[in-house]
Image: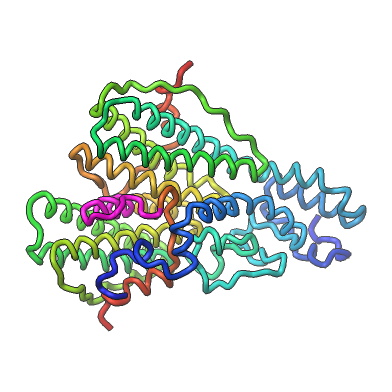
Amino acid sequence: MPESRTNSRDREPASAMEDLARDPASRRRFLRMAGGGAASAFAVFLAACNDDDDDGGGAGRTGGGSRPDPDVANPGGVAANRDMGRDPKEGTSDLEILNYALSLENLETAFYAKVIDSGLFRGSQLALIRKFADNEREHRELLETTVEKLGGKPVAPKETTFPPGTAGEVLRLAAMIENAGAAAYLGQANRIRDKEVLAAALSIHSVEARHAATLNSLAGLPVTPEGSFALPLSMEEVLSTVQPFIDS
Amino acid sequence: MTRANPIVPSLRALEVQGITRGSFILRSALAVGTVYGTGAISPYVQHAFAQRNQGDVEVLNFALTLELLEAAFYERALRLELSAPVREMAQTFGKHEREHVTALKETIDSLGGKPDEAPSFSFPIRNERSFLALAQELEETGVSAYNGAAGQIRSPEVLAAAGQIVQIEARHAAAIRSARGQAPAPRAFDRPLGMEEVLQATEPFLKT
């Protein structure tokens, strides 16, 4: 991702999803699809005779024959991917999602530490950035504890490099990272199996949204760049967004 | 019923295992269908289907009432004398809440439920200051309400839609807090609220 881009979904509509983000009519359409899913589930049920309610895994909920490509996995599209033929939980685990979230929190924590060290910010903006950094650290700690509780191994922080810039450029980068963070949690919400993990993820999601909104404001971007309905991003989309900052 | 009737091949997948009442009725009805033809079963299946979605409809109606309250609140605020940026915020946020109302109603309809009627509201706001103070309270309640209710949602589609909405509520809450000179993200984790607590928080604004 070029450094000048602050929010790919805001600036450069380059995919169907991005078009969707900018078009309230299609957004409404896919929300309707999201809701209408239940009605078509009726047909799917008769076709496949598989109940998604009880097995928790939903394997076999693939009636109707038209399976969407799992690699276009962007739940936001609630649109594209909320096809009733597919359980969003398929092919993932809570541990995988938690470690994914942890890797993002690691990145955010490293980013804010560098921003604080840069000396670019003072006064109330510095205080705000410190507060956000503290929030991310707490997220990281909760996620690490939860990964361990589930018997997993918390992913280790990676070395990161962020492009140097003016205070304004750094704020735009911060906004981009936080918007992607919020979209990342949103993208996983309905893939989480455990209720407690879901509750934790949601209580973090809305805080990432607060960070994103605040940084958008400071960077001169809209508080709600996607309008009335926030859009999720898939793991692949988020990872490709943050990849440039992770040293290989 | 432990095994489906192999007359309909897809019914082979059926197993009775920790089933809900709704899915039990569905399965029974489908078993009947294999014998008498599917025409005979649709009324039963529709009934069972409505049952299966009842929980989500309830949560959606709960969210709808909150959104109706927020939409009415921002509309009321526009009758106040507001500075230009605050007026613009009230207009934009009010539009978001109206679109949430529309989306929730459509979703409830499509699940075979009936959207709750809009209650009458009254809000103790007299000026920009009291508007912003109450706006913060209502948006915070909204965030906590969605976060608290999400665990009860069964449909992944409905959960995704609720997530799309709660993120907007959180963005509103942060912007309003900033406008009031308060920390936009005072805690690392937003607290979920139960339905009872939310109803208590919103009850003072319902006209009886």
Residue at figure coordinates x 64%, y 70% from the top left: A67
Q: Quadrant of the N terminus of chain B?
A: bottom right
Please give the count of numbered marks on the rendered protein: 0
Viewer-closest of B150 and A234 = A234
Residue A241 location, x and y as percent? 34, 71
Question: Looking at the image, which residue sits at the far right?
Answer: B36
* Residue at 55% over, 50% down: B158
B200 inside magenta stretch:
no
Q: Nearer the viewer, residue B51 or A179?
A: A179
Residue A95, visible in the rendered structure? no
Q: Residue at x 31, y 39 (%)?
A: B88
Q: Nearer the viewer, residue B94 or A188?
A: B94
Return the x and y of residue A14 as percentages of the image width and height.
Answer: 43, 70
Q: Does residue B9 sit above or below B62 in this rendering?
A: below
Q: Indicate whether A66 appears above or below B89.
A: below
Q: From the viewer's perspective, is residue B123 above or below residue B111?
A: above
> For residue A223: magenta?
yes
Q: Residue at x 41, y 31 (%)?
A: B197
Q: Position of residue A234 (x, y in %)?
A: 45, 67
Q: Which region is colored magenta? A: A207-226
**A77 in relation to A127, above or below:** below
Q: Is residue A26 visible?
A: yes
- Residue reaching furthest to the bottom: A248
Q: Say how the picture is coloured.
A: rainbow
Asked where in the image residue B75 lies, by quadrant, the reply is top left
Residue sticking out furthest to the front: B84
Q: Is residue A55 rendered to the left or right of residue B172?
A: right
Q: Main secondary structure of the magenta part?
A: helix
**Residue A216 falls left or right of residue B23:** left
Q: Position of residue A10 (x, y in %)?
A: 35, 61
